Image: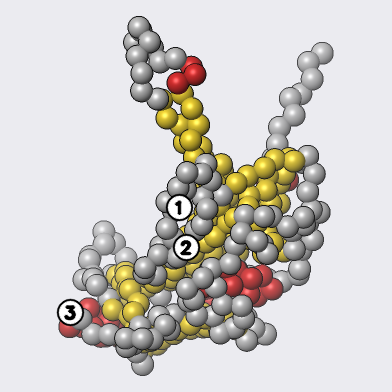
Amino acid sequence: MPTEMTTSQFHQGQLGLALETNFGTAPDAMTNFFPFNNDSLRLEQEHVEADGMTGDFVGVQDMDVQTTRRVAGGIEIPVRYVDVALLLRLITGTAASPYILTSTLPSFAVQKRVGASDYFRAAGCKIRSAEFSSSQSDQVLKAMLDLLGISEARADSGTAATYSAGSPFLHKQLTLTVGSTSVRASGWTWKIDNQLLEDAYRNSPTLLAIPRGDRVLVTGTLQGLDWNSTNRDLYTQFVNGTWAALEAVYNDGSNTLTVACPKIKIPEGTPVNPDSGSVLTDLPYRAKVAAIGDTDIITITLA
């Protein structure tokens, strides 16, 4: 009789992280494990077909050579108080709350288990960007982390996963304030784009460094705002190009996560009439520092 084929399942997956002491050298063991929703992290290898004719229109095998490699992709993680301190350190470079953007980001290793016994470990990783989002339909605050690393290795064994207990922050726990106005939104996003420089290969097959770029972009969207007198005021800010402060607080009854931007500007915001139902509008925004020399384009606090 035929034997059922063995297949790997998503529920067998595990995700662990550990800070590196030396860039590109993964620690022997992972120190933090996270529940995760999905990942697209994979090894990417560039190839080139060298010039040279050989008397035929078909390229010769030996002329196709591997050149550079890197690890890239995303990981989506539910944001829990017990996990978020390490995530914010990796995203901002600050070691403890309050978290502000710094010029140097720490490198880390990622171990992911695929199936029951395949462990892929990526080294020399940094956070390209991190986008946080929550909504009334999905509720759970999620972080989509876009990673860049220098190498990957597969093994038959890895660090055993252990998890801390804790619930994720929820959209219903969110308080939003723009300027002095309390805002009700069906969804909210905020994104930190570290603008990493990704070309430091030189005469090497792997990246020799992954420095932060010249600018860090902080953007987001206030989603699904009812068109009413309160949100007409935000539309007026859009028309006038007015800057305002934004503060968002998630409070689960025991812990708080506070995101504050001293200056945001809304680049668009005209409402549109839907086919039916309430008239809603989305207000994208971008953040800036309050004055030249400041670095507090965004401040994130845990309490």
**Quadrant in the rendering for residue 219:** bottom left
Name the residue that disc number 1 marks. Answer: 200
Q: Is residue 94 depicted above or below 35 in this figure? A: below
The percent coordinates of residue 61 (x first, y second) are: 48, 17
- Residue that numbered label 2 is attached to: 211
Percent x, y for residue 71? 55, 47
SS type, badge 1: loop
**Quadrant occupied by the C terminus:** bottom right
Amino acid found under the numbered disc labelled 3: Val
Mark 3 secondary-structure assignment: helix
Q: Residue furthest left?
A: 240
> Quick one: label 1, few (<14), some, or many (20+) residues within 10 Å?
few
- At label 3, counting other C-alpha atoms closer than 10 Å, the crowd grade (few under 14, some 14-19, many 20 or more) is some
Mark whose residue sits in front, 2 or 3: 2
Q: Evaluate if marks 1 and 2 touch, with contact meaning CB atoms under 8 Å apart.
A: yes
Amino acid at the residue labelled 2: Pro
Mark 1 or 3, closer to the camera: 1
